[in-house]
């Protein structure tokens, strides 16, 4: 969308309480944060906005800015329910920490961090092009080879990020996860899943707890929501967005999150199991660049994560019985398969 541009370069034919504070801060800081003195007079054009769960995004194009500087800015405002100022500060710090690792890579990217506005609970980054990997699965022209390559690049991105933020190895926070498990399993049963599946899940976790307890695992800053929705693809380049920057934990959390999100693409679009499997293998092969270690840990985290996310999706669809049936049907198949993987 485009809005009228006033004489001073700010979009405004009327006062807009939603965007006025953002534009004021941008105007105050153009020269200080973004550009040299020539760019302090750049004009701001609000070209679009997008409201997401927990945040709102505003996109500004700058005219009269030097060609070697960002031409489009993205302003992300965090809602109070998503953490507001604290979440914004944390994400800006995570981007700033990771930026030197990705700054010179032509194919593995993050949005360039530009500014943190604490009074607005907002961060400013350079806009990045691309389509989410999730949506790539919905386009007819996306061939198997292209999707597998994009997933492999996502694995390479994640490996680079974990290596750059590596911490001393330590065991999985297993007891904390097991403490939360009875509540998750109770919600699972209340959501209407098959009665015999709950005990099977419980038995599977019990069998493999002993196999992973005490194992020292690679630890790093974890993305927190490394999923097909947060990987943008533009040709051979991938850009990862929405770094949470709040957890230091076993790197397998991010691996499990991505693989689960890959499996769940078939909830909303017909995707062949063989394609999902090939993309998952491409992702893991690129991440490890060798044989996968600690597969039991990965499968354990995937199973716990699948239970959590499928319950959440089912609970959000309380008034849509047909969709809830499909979520249960597909999720139960995934969970039974995950139990089988744990036995391999």
Image (cartoon, helix red, strand yellow):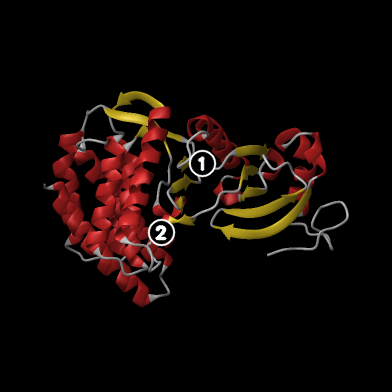
Residue 134's tag is 2
The image shows residue 1, relative to residue 102, as above or below, that is: below
Q: Residue drawn at (76%, 49%), measured in percent from left and top?
A: 23
Which image quarter holds the N terminus?
bottom right
Mark 2 and mark 1 lie on one chain; the one further toward the N terminus is 1
Classify residue 276 by image quadrant: bottom left
Q: Residue drawn at (75%, 44%), measured in percent from left and top?
A: 65
Classify residue 153 by image quadrant: top left
- Badge 1 marks a residue whose secondary structure is loop
Residue 223 x/y as whole percent: 43, 40
Q: Residue furthest bottom?
A: 322
Q: Are marks 2 and 1 in contact (CB under 8 Å)?
A: no
Classify residue 269 by image quadrant: bottom left
Tag 1: Cα neighbours inside 10 Å, few (<14), some, or many (≥20)? many
Going by the image, does 129 lie left or right of 289?
Answer: right
- Badge 2 marks a residue whose secondary structure is helix
Going by the image, does 127 lie left or right of 149?
Answer: right
Q: Residue furthest left?
A: 344
The image shows residue 293, relative to residue 242, as above or below, that is: above
Q: CA distance from mark 2 to mark 1?
A: 18 Å
Q: Which residue is mark 1?
A: 110
Q: Is residue 247 visible?
A: yes
Q: Nearer the viewer, residue 342 or 26?
A: 26
Q: Residue drawn at (81%, 53%), measured in percent from left and top?
A: 10
Q: Is residue 308 visible?
A: no
């Amino acid at each position: 969308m485009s809005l009228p541009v006033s004489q001073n370069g700010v979009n405004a034919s009327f006062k807009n309480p939603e965007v006025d504070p953002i534009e004021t801060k941008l105007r105050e800081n153009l020269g200080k944060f973004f550009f040299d003195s020539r760019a302090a007079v750049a004009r701001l054009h609000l070209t679009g906005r997008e409201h997401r769960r927990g945040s709102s995004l505003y996109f500004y194009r700058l005219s009269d800015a030097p060609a070697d500087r960002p031409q489009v800015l993205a302003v992300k405002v965090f809602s109070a329910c998503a953490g507001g100022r604290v979440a914004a500060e944390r994400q800006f710090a995570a981007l700033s920490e990771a930026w030197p690792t990705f700054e010179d890579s032509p194919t593995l990217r993050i949005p360039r961090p530009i500014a943190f506005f604490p009074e607005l609970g907002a961060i400013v980054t350079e806009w990045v092009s691309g389509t989410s990997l999730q949506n790539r699965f919905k386009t007819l022209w996306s061939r198997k080879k292209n999707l597998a390559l994009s997933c492999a690049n996502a694995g390479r991105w994640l490996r680079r990020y974990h290596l750059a933020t590596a911490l001393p190895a330590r065991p999985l926070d297993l007891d904390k996860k097991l403490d939360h498990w009875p509540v998750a399993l109770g919600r699972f049963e209340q959501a209407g899943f098959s009665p015999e599946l709950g005990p099977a899940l419980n038995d599977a976790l019990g069998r493999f707890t002993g196999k992973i307890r005490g194992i020292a695992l690679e630890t790093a800053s974890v993305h927190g929501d490394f999923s097909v929705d947060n990987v943008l693809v533009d040709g051979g380049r991938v850009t990862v967005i929405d770094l949470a920057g709040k957890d230091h934990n076993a790197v397998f959390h991010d691996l499990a999150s991505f693989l689960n999100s890959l499996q769940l693409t078939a909830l909303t679009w017909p995707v062949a199991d063989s394609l999902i499997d090939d993309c998952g293998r491409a992702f893991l092969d690129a991440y490890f660049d060798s044989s996968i270690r600690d597969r039991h840990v990965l499968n354990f985290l995937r199973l716990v994560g699948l239970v959590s996310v499928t319950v959440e999706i089912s609970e959000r669809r309380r008034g849509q019985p047909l969709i809830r049936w499909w979520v249960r049907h597909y999720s139960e198949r995934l969970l039974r398969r995950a139990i089988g993987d744990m036995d391999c």
